[in-house]
């Protein structure tokens, strides 16, 4: 029986397996940020420990940073303390920090790949559940808690139980107006917000192969939204072409060696998965969520499930969710007015996402009833957007281009959606209060978000392209 | 942090909602602390209080119902999904719970809970519903969670379910051992592995 992509990477990183227990897994790269690391550093100090392999740790400030006037001191005291604490910890423990003002600063899951730090075959962790993003490069990458951040800082290892394996095959061609975000929202709607819990998921099939690296990252990013331990895609020519020449990519002989090593990273033809799903790309239409978990998604022309379609036991949670969203069972949501459009987050804030939005809105204006925020994923994305003139397109359309950070994806900084308002968002979570207390989030692709920005309502983008 | 756990006999607090994500357990705006302490007062913050106002507790939410108390939190399936924030486990522990019972746990939350000596007890959906019914009818009902023998029992009726936990983690919890101590003792092996 052959090995899966997951097996090949996992087996190369197991230092030891404890009988009746977890494995000690070696971690190649560890990303840290200001929100989930301070208590870990405090733990090291209390134990009198150093960071074991500081060169394998990369830090940035993203969750809690303002997205306007980043050159000024952070106004909010607690946020400022957290960002300053990160700076202090990185200096003390010898960790490279791409903090505010640094040309490499940005959302941790955007900068890792764009700097070429993320490479096939690696194990990668970060105190953030969307670490699954890096799996798009054929890595085992997953989110961890702060106690685990401390373990990795102290030993470069983690205790991990081997997950079960699932492969999701998406075959065929995508319909017009359907992009990778729609694929993952469709998958999660099919298998629910807990449908992949306990599994590492490999995405395969022609529809996945045909995607760019940015689009693959969007898919792997949301693996956690169906509970998966991680999401991954086998590296191929697209992966190699993306990494080549990036700041921290291998050079010269090391490059040749790396590429030849990466070419062994795929699931063997006779590899067996614990579970396998088959999806036809042509069945997918532009998707939108209507509820308060990412599994509550429908096609844009579909309707919110009627009560008769919901399992008896799940009715209280379903009704609670619709009450929060101000939506009715059975209603069509196309045409409903929205108040905010947020284009950003580690799911959809890369240059390709901004280009997609810009090419749609070029020459158009935003609707009068909406406020549109575009938050680039990194300083590099911001710079490139300006070089390509994308910022002008946004300015002409009445969009506000802000500075890099997690922003309104989680409403930790001041970028919050007011209570009761509807926000069409390219982010990853529609949980209650996620974008601010009382905020109502509708998750969509950048293209569907751009359409809503122009019409001011939930729109089927296919009618406009 | 109260280290080592074994037998917990207590009343329980039932939160029947399913898919409780860590944003509900502890909203992002409360993650700005740089220490592990004091998160309990913001546990389920937006479900507990009207407009976040501590003077206006929502009477329907179980944490505000004085009939319910105890060291055991019983919650609907897929508990702890979403963000990896360990603050969720800190908040539950800090509030005074030692055990969370559900029919399904999100992976990252489960690890975070175990690393904080908060025991996640996974039971079949039917038993979970039995527990909800029990506590709704009699909030004073005692429940025993026995880690050593891996069972959860309704004391009055003796109805019992076993639960799984790997033997390594069980030893850690019973004795108050941390993963980090184990890993630190492996430094030589880790260095040897790096040289391979």
Image: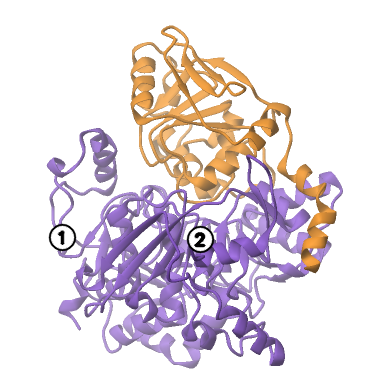
Chain colours: A purple, B orange
Of callouts 1 and 2, which one flags the residue occurring earlier in the amino acid sequence? 2
Alpha-carbon neighbours of circle 1 within 10 Å: few (<14), some, or many (≥20)?
some
Parent chain of label 2: A
Up-down relation of residue A210 to residue A199 (above or below): below
- Residue at 26% x, 37% y is A314
Give the x, y percent position of residue A200.
48, 57
Q: Are marks 1 and 2 on the same chain?
A: yes
Give the x, y percent position of residue B80.
47, 42
**Nearer to us in this view, A5 or A145:** A5
- Residue at 29% x, 64% y is A278
- Residue at 26% x, 62% y is A288
Up-down relation of residue B41 to residue A237 (above or below): above
Up-down relation of residue A283 to residue A304 (above or below): below
Give the x, y percent position of residue B129.
34, 25
Helix, strand or loop for disc 2: helix
**Nearer to us in this view, A419 or B139:** B139
Helix, strand or loop for disc 1: loop
- Can see residue A373? yes
Residue B130: numbered disc = none
**Nearer to us in this view, B21 or B128:** B128
- Residue at 62% x, 64% y is A123
Provide the residue designation for mark 1.
Answer: A302
Residue A130: numbered disc = 2
Alpha-carbon neighbours of circle 2 within 10 Å: few (<14), some, or many (≥20)?
many
Up-down relation of residue A111 to residue B24 (above or below): below
Q: Is residue A335 left or right of residue A377?
A: left
Give the x, y percent position of residue A353.
40, 78
């Amino acid at each position: 029986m052959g090995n899966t992509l997951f097996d090949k990477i996992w087996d190369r990183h197991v230092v030891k397996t404890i009988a009746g227990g977890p494995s000690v897994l070696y971690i190649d790269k560890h990303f840290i940020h200001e929100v989930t690391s301070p208590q870990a550093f405090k733990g090291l100090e209390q134990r009198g420990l150093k960071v074991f392999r500081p060169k394998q740790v990369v830090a940035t400030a993203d969750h809690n940073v303002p997205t306007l006037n980043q050159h000024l001191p952070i106004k909010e005291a607690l946020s400022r303390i957290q960002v300053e604490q990160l700076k202090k910890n990185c200096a003390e423990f010898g960790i490279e920090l791409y903090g505010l003002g640094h040309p490499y600063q940005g959302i941790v899951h955007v900068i890792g790949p764009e700097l070429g730090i993320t490479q096939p075959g690696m194990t990668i962790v970060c105190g953030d559940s969307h670490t699954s993003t890096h799996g798009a490069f054929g890595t085992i990458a997953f989110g961890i808690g702060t106690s685990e951040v401390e373990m990795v800082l102290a030993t470069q290892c983690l205790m991990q139980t081997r997950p079960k394996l699932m492969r999701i095959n998406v075959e065929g061609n995508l319909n017009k107006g359907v992009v990778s975000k729609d694929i993952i929202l469709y998958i999660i709607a099919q298998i629910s917000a807990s449908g992949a819990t306990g599994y590492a998921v490999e995405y395969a099939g022609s529809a996945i192969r045909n995607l760019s690296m940015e689009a693959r990252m969007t898919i792997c990013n949301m693996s956690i939204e169906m509970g998966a331990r991680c999401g991954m895609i086998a590296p191929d020519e697209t992966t190699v072409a993306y990494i080549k020449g990036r700041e921290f990519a291998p050079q010269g002989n090391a490059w040749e060696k790396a590429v030849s090593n990466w070419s062994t990273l795929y699931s063997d033809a006779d590899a067996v998965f614990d579970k396998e799903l088959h999806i036809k790309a042509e069945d997918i239409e532009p998707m939108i969520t209507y509820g308060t978990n990412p599994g509550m998604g429908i096609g844009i022309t579909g309707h919110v499930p009627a009560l008769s379609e919901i399992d008896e036991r799940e009715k209280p949670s379903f009704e609670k969710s619709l009450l929060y969203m101000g939506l009715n069972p059975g209603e069509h949501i196309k045409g409903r007015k929205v108040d905010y459009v947020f284009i950003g987050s580690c799911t959809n804030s890369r240059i390709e996402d901004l280009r997609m939005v810009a090419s749609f809105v070029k020459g158009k204006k935003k609707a009068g009833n909406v406020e549109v925020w575009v938050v680039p994923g990194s300083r590099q994305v911001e710079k490139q957007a300006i070089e390509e003139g994308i910022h002008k397109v946004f300015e002409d359309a009445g969009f506000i281009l802000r500075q890099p950070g997690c922003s309104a994806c989680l409403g930790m900084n001041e970028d919050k959606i007011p209570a009761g308002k509807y926000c069409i968002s390219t982010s990853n979570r529609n949980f209650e209060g996620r974008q601010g207390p009382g905020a109502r989030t509708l998750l969509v692709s950048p293209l569907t978000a751009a359409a809503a920005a122009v019409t001011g309502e939930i729109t089927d983008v296919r009618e406009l392209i | 942090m109260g280290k080592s756990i074994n037998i917990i006999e207590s009343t329980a607090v039932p939160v029947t909602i399913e898919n409780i994500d860590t944003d509900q357990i502890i909203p992002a705006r409360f993650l700005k602390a740089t220490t592990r302490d004091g998160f309990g007062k913001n546990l389920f913050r937006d479900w507990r209080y009207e407009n976040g106002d501590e003077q206006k507790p929502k009477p329907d939410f179980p944490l505000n119902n004085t009939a319910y108390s105890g060291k055991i939190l019983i919650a609907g399936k897929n508990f702890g999904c979403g963000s990896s924030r360990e603050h969720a486990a800190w908040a539950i522990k800090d509030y005074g719970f030692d055990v969370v019972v559900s029919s399904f746990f999100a992976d990252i939350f489960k690890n975070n809970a175990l690393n904080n000596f908060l025991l996640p007890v996974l039971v079949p959906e039917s038993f979970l519903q039995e527990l909800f019914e029990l506590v709704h009818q009699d909030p004073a009902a005692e429940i025993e969670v026995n880690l050593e023998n891996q069972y959860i029992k309704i004391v009055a009726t003796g109805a019992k379910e076993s639960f799984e936990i790997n033997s390594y983690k069980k030893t850690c919890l019973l004795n108050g051992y941390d993963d980090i101590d184990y890993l630190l003792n492996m430094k030589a092996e880790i260095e040897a592995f790096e040289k391979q």
